[in-house]
Structures are given as C-alpha cells and as structure tokens.
Image: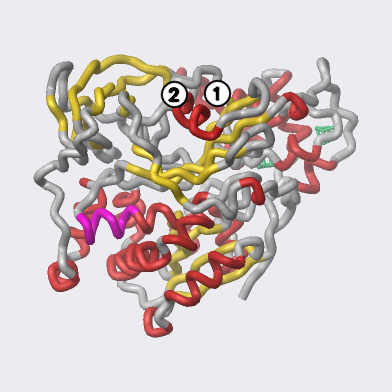
Amino acid sequence: MAFSFFGGVHPKENKWYAEEKKVQTFPEPDVLIIPMNQHIGAPCKPLVKKGDSVTMGQKIGDNQGLCVPVHASVSGTVKAVEMRPHSSGMTVMSVVIQNDHLDTLCEDIKPRTQEEIDKLTDTELMNIIREAGIVGMGGATFPTHVKLSSGLGKVDTIIVNVSECEPYIVADDRLCQEYPAEMLKGLQIIMKIFNLNSAHIGIEDNKSAAVKALRREIDPQTGIQVDVLPAKYPQGAEKQLIQAITGRQVPSGGLPAAVGCAVFNAATCKAIYDAVYLGMPLIRRIVTVSGDIVMEPKNLMVPIGTTFNDLLEAVGHRENPYKVLSGGPMMGAAQFDLSVPVIKGSNAVTILGSKNRFRVNEPHCIRCGKCIDVCPMRLMPLMMYSAQRGGDLEELKKQNLLDCIECGCCAYTCPATIPLVQAFRAGKQQLRDAAAKK
Ligand code: SF4
Ligand code: SF4
C-alpha cells in the first residue's frame, strides 16, 4: 500500500536529458585520486606509499571502528599519498595512482559459485560486504555492514530505494533497467542476512521502463514487490520513503530501525552482488553527467577516483558552467575545484548554465509561510533561519534544526530566494561546535 508524506515539492524533473542514455564504460583516466574519506566514520589510513605498485581491486586504505576499506580502481603505480581536494569542500588524504592501463586484477579477487554462497554464514556475508568497502551509494555513504549488523533482530521491513527524486539524475533508473538481475541478487543477500522472506522496492512512477525491467526479472517466490509511488520530491529521503511505503514515521532523532525498517540504495544492492558473487570490491559506479548546458548528457560507469574535470570533458558544455554540482540541483554541493574525484557516494555531476543565476543580493523574509507548507520534516524554516542569523543556538535546538534533512524544498519554494539550506548547514555546525566545547 502506498501512503504519502507531508510537504514536498515538484521541481522540473529534467530527467529527459539522460534517461534514454545507456550506461557507457568510461575510458579509464591516466591518473586517479582515491580519497581516504569516502564514508561516514573514521577515515582510512593509507596502506601504500609513493612508488608502490598496485593492482585493480587491491585494498589501499583501511582503519578500525566505523570504517570500510578503499581499493585501487585501476592497476598502476602510486604517484603520491597526499592531501587533495574532495567534493565535500575539504582537503583529505588521498592516494594518487598513475594508471598503467593493464587492469591487472588483484589476486584476492575470486568469484563464488551459488553453492559456495549458500554455505556462507550471515557473519561471513557481512564481513565480505565490509571488506568490499560497501557504503550507502545514494549519497549517505554509511557503511553497509554496520547498517546490517545493527539492524539484526530489529528490522522486519527491507526497502530498496529507487526513488531518485532529484532532477536530472537517472543513475539508479538506468541501473535497474540494465542490471536488474544483479540488483535483485544483492537484495536477496540482504534478505538472507535479516532472515526475511519479503522486501519492497520503492520507485517513482516516472520510471516505467525500470519498473517493467524489475517486474520482468522478479521471481514471485522471492517475496520481492515493486511499490510504484507518485513522483514527489524528496521521496528518496529515507524517512519519507519509509512513510510512503509502510505508513510508519521515524521519530525525531531516530533511525529507520526504530520503526523496524532498513533502506538500501539500488546501487548498494548491485555492489553487494559484485562483492559476494564476483568477489569484486566497490571500485566503479554509475554516474549521471547531465545539466542544461551539457552537449551530450551521459550515464557513465566510472572508476572511483576519476576527476570531475575528466567527466566534463567527456560530455562537453555549450557555455562556461555557472555551477558544477556533486549530485543534483536540490541537494548537490557546488564545486569550486573540478580536480575533485568521483567517490563511492557520487551518483551525479550536474552542470548548470548562467540562466540558473537567480539570487537577489540581500534577500529578506516576507513571512509568506510557503517554506513551512513544503517542509517534509514539519519544521519551521523561517524561524530556524532567523535564529541562525541571530546566533540563537537555544532557539535552533528548540526548532529541531538537527532534524532538517537539507532537502532544499524550503529554499526551492522561497519567493525571496533566501539561501535557507546554507544557513541550516552553518547552524548545524554551530550546534556541533558548541557541543564539542562543552
Ligand atoms: S531543507 Fe530542512 S527545513 Fe528546508 S524543507 Fe528540507 S527539511 Fe525542511
Ligand atoms: S518562504 Fe522564504 S520568504 Fe516565505 S516565510 Fe519562508 S523564508 Fe520567509
């Protein structure tokens, strides 16, 4: 049964730019930059040094605690281990690899037969998923093995997120059309770990080809069902998707497991298939490279570590970009340095032209209340904005700023074009700094 969620908006989808474009293998770049921070948690420590030879799929970084390893996405020689710009806006420790274009595979990588897989215990499966460096590939980048282990005994409903509600992005849509069998096999591994015999795939009604491909591939015996949801942004936000599919509401500050749910991105399921069946760690992903000034929008299978510059060159653009975003126009982060690399959570690079420059110089709130009507978290964006501007941290807490999912619905609808999300990100940082001082 499909429910709806409160608020939300209907931005122009602009999916047509790339939705018909089949996934192409990106020609491997000569140099790749593999950041040690590609997940939520402790950054990896490099396991290689300048001058070392590496093979494709070799582990090149790892750490203790909340962490997953990173791997070389090509074979070659380590050119440097140094700080490099990252799409988060920070500079992070990275391994720079000179590609030898030989694709020499790491000798640890070995496929498994179905018989071998059937004999694996849940702990062994979760360890394979950890060792393959798998994280939430919709952008959240939370380590998947931790989501699995922490949900054991609590989760009764698995949801695969194919909402992909951000304008322009079609990477998961294409993945479900072109790799439905692999995605479903990955999902069945998750079902095995949770010991559940049913699962939902949540997908918006603007992806009819993907719905058909999945339904064609699903064996009714597996208990997997496709839930087609009316397109509305931000359907793909975890809490909104859970509400849309189950009617359950994740409490303020709570995790999906609090209401018995676990949500996995479609690309994450495919990565689990690659790890368990092929023995292949997460070293490639599909990236939609699109935008209103792009000459030839594409969906590219890209080695992790490919720079945004390489991707821009591959698609071309008609004018100087006004903005290049990691992600889509609603939640994406604007990039100031295009030498940043694709990481595990990069589902899109969106390139926008000057007609998107619409901000007024000194915006003032006109108290219209539109931001309140669209906030899917039922927050009061105008109150949060005024508290953040006034540096009133107590009021920010009272207004539950930390529940803001930074979806951008408020900013999208604000007639005064106030940069609300930037203010909320800054406010969250102020709260974190204040907590750290205490
Ligand atoms: S960005 Fe935050 S405050 Fe604005 S609509 Fe989304 S959840 Fe609400
Ligand atoms: S939508 Fe913009 S102008 Fe209207 S109340 Fe909210 S912040 Fe103010």
Residue 433 is left or right of residue 414, and the answer is left
As drawn, 151 above or below 423: below
- Quadrant location, the N terminus: bottom right
- Residue 315 visible within the image: yes
Residue neighbourhood size for the residue with mark 2, other residues' Cα within 10 Å, grouped as few (<14), some (14–19), many (≥20):
many
Q: CA distance from mark 1 to mark 2?
A: 8 Å
Q: Is residue 293 magenta?
A: no
- Which numbered tag is attached to residue 340? 2
Count of labels in the image: 2
Q: Which residues are magenta?
A: 271-278
Q: Quadrant of ligand 2?
A: top right
- Which numbered tag is attached to residue 335? 1
Residue at image coords 25%, 24%? 97
Decide: marks 1, 2 in contact (CB < 8 A)?
yes
Indicate if the residue with disc 1 has its beta carbon within 8 Å of ligand 1. Answer: no
Image quadrant in which you'd find residue 105: top left
As drawn, 75 above or below 220: above
